[in-house]
Amino acid sequence: MLGNFVYHNPTKLYFGPDALDSLKQELQQYGPKVQLIYGKGSIKRSGLYDQIVAILQQCGKQVFEDAGVMPNPTVDKLYEGCRIAKQNDVDLLLAVGGGSVCDYAKAVSVSAHCTEDPWDKYYLRMQDVDNKIIPVGCVLTMVGTGSEMNGGAVITDPKTKLKIGHVFGPNVFPKFSIMNPEWTYSLPKYQMVAGIYDIMSHIIEQYFSGDDDNTSDYLAEGLLRSLIHSSRIAVQDTQNYEARSNIMWTATWALNTLINRGKPCDFMVHKMGQSVGGYTDATHGMTLAAVSMAYYRFLLPYGLPKFKRYAVNVWQVDATDKTDEQIAAEGLQHMEAWMREIGLVMNLTELGVTEQMIDGIADGTFINRGGYKILTREEVVTILKQSL
């Protein structure tokens, strides 16, 4: 294990078909004013909205609605949410939806009482929170981001085409998250598959870093094998509870800070994918899938031992009479075949990216330093072009 680290995760999880029964006891711990945050209406069609509002009313809560959170929450939407929270002095932000809704709620939680422009402070200058934080609770209906148990909050500025994630500390983590895998059944298959790849990307972007014998890597390999197995079942039977529940649980553990302990972490696929999203507003998981194969084939020579291990331990590649390079390359071939099998977007062109956008996307790609190779801007451009 590398270096010194602290592990602390304060989020309490309620998981399973009866998870919503626990909302009432959680609400009792907060004041009377609740900002109910959700997207564009799917929770109303499913009936979940009525269930939650009934519980809020039973608990005597005054509800302030904050609807219309989009898949890539914008700066203007953040400002709107901050106005609702501050003007009504809300005691709890209750996010009902997927990762974008949860991300947005955390962004509002740190921004509502910020005395500066929160976009400038938290997303451009990446400063820490030094003001009052409004607690967040999540009722999760989509899986992928892991936002239900971490401090990540991604916001997009359409004017500058910047999509930026700020990973806040445990003081911003949701206080509780309620997770019923059955709520994910109605999700369109395209969104389900995109979420599955977001999970995959979270795990391997932590995995492909460091060269020590790290417990986190063994945990990551187990999560990856579970995800691959369950994904194949879920794409054939979207209402298979066992598969959907395993995917939901894997998503949480993929990015709740457990498996990055002692790891430098890469996350360049996310940086490129987020920049693509800033230009196209495409589904997040698909932006990651579109750039992944070009990136990992570029990265392979710099992290060959780990790519070989990945091939053998995750994809069960037979290493007999093969060079390390052949084993590692075969692992990526298996990964690409699985991606195509479950229906992922495999190129940027399908997401609306043109060659004329590449320079701008490269300019909007933040360079991380934790992977096997610190990319130059020119290398980012090359990878993006190879992903068209």
Image (tube, rainbow, N blue to C red):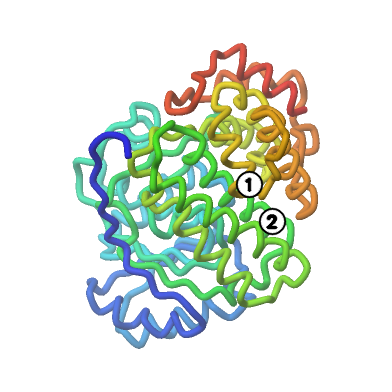
Left or right position of 108 against 221: left
Q: Amino acid at mark 1?
A: Gly
Residue at the image point whose x is 56% and y is 71% from the top: 245
Left or right position of 112 against 246: left
Q: Residues within 10 Å of mark 1 (few under 14, many from 20)?
A: many
Q: Residues within 10 Å of mark 2 (few under 14, many from 20)?
A: many
Please tell me whether mark 2 sits on a helix, a strand or a loop: helix
Residue 43 x/y as whole percent: 58, 72
Residue farthest to the front? 321
Q: Which residue is mark 2?
A: 193
Numbered circle sitting on residue 15: none
Quarter of the image where the N terminus is located:
top left
Residue at the image point whose x is 73% and y is 37% from the top: 330
In the displayed structure, would residue 310 be above or below residue 272? below
Q: Which residue is mark 1?
A: 285
Q: Amino acid at mark 2?
A: Val
Q: CA distance from mark 2 to mark 1?
A: 8 Å
Please tell me whether mark 1 sits on a helix, a strand or a loop: helix
In the displayed structure, would residue 233 be above or below residue 378? below
Left or right position of 129 against 152: left
Q: Say if mark 2 contacts mark 1, CB within 8 Å.
A: yes
Residue 278 x/y as whole percent: 59, 34
